């Protein structure tokens, strides 16, 4: 799933392609999107001007001049293809926004899980997001206060977008490795020093991320994610993988020892 750095990269690309332009038409090529945007919605977008494209966590918001918001989310495999109206559509095109200058942005998604919604003026989407990693209000004490209310291990808690917006499976695993914290540690049991180390690690891995999708070359730069059976980059212990809340978690059993009584 694209996480904050990848979505930020996508937003920058689509902002350059869409901001300041007027929409000629919006087309939907998949039934799941037609259930979200009616024909009247599509007609109402004709002539609308895109003022800007913003990001909130993993959400992408096309801010229209009339106050409405066209809200996109990639989910697992979505991405933008930027081309011209005369070009052949990508194989997995799910929606297309064509502008009056004949340029086009296409929502391309092999698994067809991406979403598009239109929100009326003066009713911005309620995303229920926590602070982003770069938010100065996200302090160790504030983060620890959120952890104190949660039961269960830290790794699944980090995936809750109400805790830290934009953080996902890959960078949560990376941050825990950098902070030398077990993914099995109880979120509510972390000390202030451990929480501070984790927050610093989250910010570090997000800042270092390239924003590229998960190609072999980008994964090769990761410390622990998708490296099961390979040596830890810090201590050379074999990296292990476990399942947590239906997601794969990668960690070093030596650098990130399980809490007493927990089995890794």
Image (spheres, helix red, strand yellow):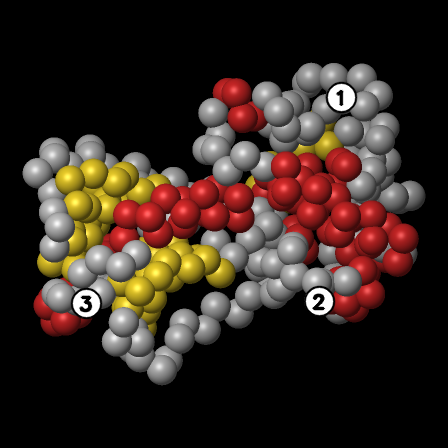
The image shows residue 224 at horizontal and vertical percentages of 68, 29
Image coordinates of residue 188 in percent, x first then y, are: 81, 60
Q: Tell me how far mark 3 sits from mark 1, CA to CA.
A: 51 Å
Earlier sequence position, callout 3 versus callout 1: 3
Give the image quarter of residue 195: bottom right
x 23%, y 45%: residue: 106
Inspect this view and state whether residue 228 appears: yes
Residue that numbered label 1 is attached to? 233
Who is closer to the viewer here, 249 or 127? 127
Quadrant location of the C terminus in the rendered image: top right
Residue furthest bottom in the image? 122
Q: Kindly check if marks 3 and 1 are in contact, taking CB atoms under 8 A apart as contact.
A: no
Under circle 3, the secondary element is loop
Q: How would you rate the neighbour count of disc 1 (Cα within 10 Å): few for under 14, some for 14-19, many for 20 or more?
A: few
Which corner quadrant of the image does residue 248 belong to?
Answer: top right
Indicate the secondary structure of the residue bearing disc 1.
Answer: loop
Q: Residues within 10 Å of mark 3 (few under 14, many from 20)?
A: some
The first of marks 2 and 1 along the sequence is 2
Discs 3/1, front: 3
Residue that carries the numbered disc 2 in the rendered image? 137
Which residue is drawn at the image coordinates 48% and 68% (left, top)?
A: 127
Residue 99 image point, x, y percent? 16, 53
Discs 3, 2 touching: Cβ within 8 Å: no
Q: Which residue is mark 3?
A: 48
Residue at image location 55% in from the left, 53% down from the top: 166
Mark 2 vs mark 1, CA separation in Å: 32 Å
127 left or right of 163 in image:
left
User: How far across and how far down the image is residue 202, in percent?
Assistant: 70, 47
65 versus 54 height, above or below: below
Task: Give the residue drawn at x 65%, y 61%.
Answer: 135
């Amino acid at each position: 799933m694209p996480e904050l750095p990848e979505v930020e990269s996508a937003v920058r690309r689509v902002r350059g392609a869409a901001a300041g332009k007027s929409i000629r038409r919006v087309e939907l090529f998949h039934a799941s999107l037609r259930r979200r945007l009616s024909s009247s919605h599509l007609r109402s977008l004709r002539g609308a001007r895109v003022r800007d494209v913003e990001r909130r966590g993993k959400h992408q918001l096309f801010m229209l001049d009339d106050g409405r918001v066209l809200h996109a989310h990639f989910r697992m495999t979505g991405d933008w293809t930027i081309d011209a109206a005369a070009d052949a559509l990508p194989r997995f095109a799910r929606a297309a926004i064509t502008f009056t200058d004949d340029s086009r942005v296409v929502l391309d998604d092999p698994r067809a899980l991406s979403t598009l919604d239109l929100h009326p003026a003066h009713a911005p989407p309620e995303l229920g997001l926590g602070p982003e990693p770069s938010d100065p209000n996200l302090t160790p004490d504030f983060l620890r206060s959120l952890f104190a209310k949660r039961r269960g291990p830290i790794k699944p808690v980090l995936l809750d977008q109400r805790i830290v917006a934009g953080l996902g499976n890959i960078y949560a695993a990376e941050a825990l490795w950098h902070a030398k914290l077990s993914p099995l540690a109880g979120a509510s049991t972390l000390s202030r020093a451990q929480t501070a180390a984790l927050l610093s690690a989250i910010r570090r891995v997000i800042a270092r991320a390239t924003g590229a999708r998960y190609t072999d070359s980008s994964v090769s730069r990761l410390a622990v994610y998708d490296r099961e059976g390979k040596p830890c980059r810090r201590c050379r212990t074999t990296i292990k993988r476990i399942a947590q809340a239906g997601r794969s978690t990668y960690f070093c059993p030596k650098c990130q020892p399980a809490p007493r009584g927990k089995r890794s």
